[in-house]
Image (spheres, grey):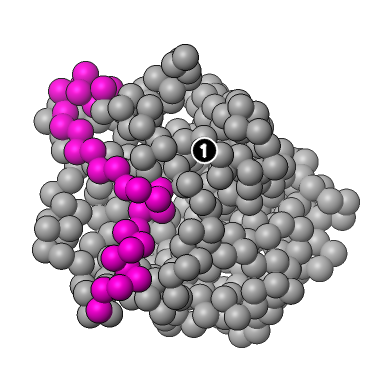
Amino acid sequence: MNDPRVEQYAALLVDKCIDVQPGWQVLVNGGVLARPLLEAVSRQIGRRGAYALQRANLSGSGINLPWALEAPEELLATPTGIEAHVWQEADALVAIEAPENTRELSILPAERLALIQGGLRPHLERVLRMELKWVGCQYPTPALAQEADMSLEAFADFLYGACLLDWDAERERMSRYAERFDAADEVHIVAGDTDLRLSIAGRSMIVDAGGANMPGGEFFTSPVEDSAEGEIVFGEFPAVYLGREVRGARLRFDGGVVVDASAEVNEEFLIEQLDLDEGARRLGELGIGCNPAIARHMKNTLFDEKIDGTVHLAVGQGLPDAGGVNVSQLHWDIVKEMRAEGTRIELDGEPVQESGRWLL
């Protein structure tokens, strides 16, 4: 039977998240397992008088792995003219993750993956500047359900429950918190193993309530690039990135730069990513999770960074819309639990959240 929530989800993506206009050329990318959503999104785009340029991929990773494993390195680092033209001419993008195997990219050597990322980086400028309107989302697959230790039916209920919210009401609620951050200069993140200060002076918070990510449920900015001082330990949840899982990551900052890093599991991969380029060791994002329907970690960053009562930091690429100027191939969001006793967020020395509860 068709799930009526798929059509509701598609309407949310097309109408609210990117607000497709007549005549637009909209890329609709996703894994083949997401066929019901790919088709529903295409229908919604057609109803708005726009073009749906559907591009389904076999694995759900977005990378042609058989080709990426065999092609000469000079090809990996240089996207074709056709691909570059698509990124320059498209008006919007709906990117649907639907992996058959969440660890599939782990077969691709890190150096080859870095070449692909570096080659695509210049063509993603329009995405980063939001000149190309976009939304990234997921479709429930067995692989995602297994990562979350759920049945497929339970994971689908969770996904739609986290996405099909009253986003106007959520925007109003989160904006109250974001306004207090906009009025502050310094953020201080404190936990038993963490003492980190960073500046957000002159930067603005962006409230994600049905925008570029679905689910929404966070507000975020780019910290001042040379401001991070202190140490943060991501000891509660694994950090999953490009099919690899890093546990117990610890980052120490001096002058905004990660000067020391370690991990309990997969430390080599962590260091490889931090050494990708000059900007990879600086912060590109500070985000505050607020989605009331997400309460636990799923090994799924799209959802985990929205857990109500958490913060996340991204090393690497900054967010131009929030004033960020850091440039990197990397943008890796890592989530920190802030609901434990004794944890707090301070703004200019004043506690605004304690043990995950707002004091505002």
Is residue 344 located in the magenta-colored stretch of the structure?
Answer: no
Compared with residue 167, is residue 278 higher up or lower down, i.e. above or below?
A: below
| Point 12% across, 30% down: residue | 23
Q: Nearer the viewer, residue 175 or 285?
A: 285
Residue denoted by label 1 = 141
Extreme residue toward the right, this view: 341
Please state which amino acid type lies under the numbered disc 1. Answer: Thr
| Point 36% across, 32% down: residue | 35
* Quarter of the rendering containing residue 319: bottom left
Q: Is residue 233 left or right of residue 34?
A: right
Query: Which segment is the magenta one?
Result: 43-72
| Residue 174 in picture, x, y percent from top left | 58, 36
| Residue 170 in picture, x, y percent from top left | 56, 29
Q: Secondary structure at mark 1?
A: loop
| Residue 286 in picture, x, y percent from top left | 56, 58
| Point 76% across, 64% down: residue | 235
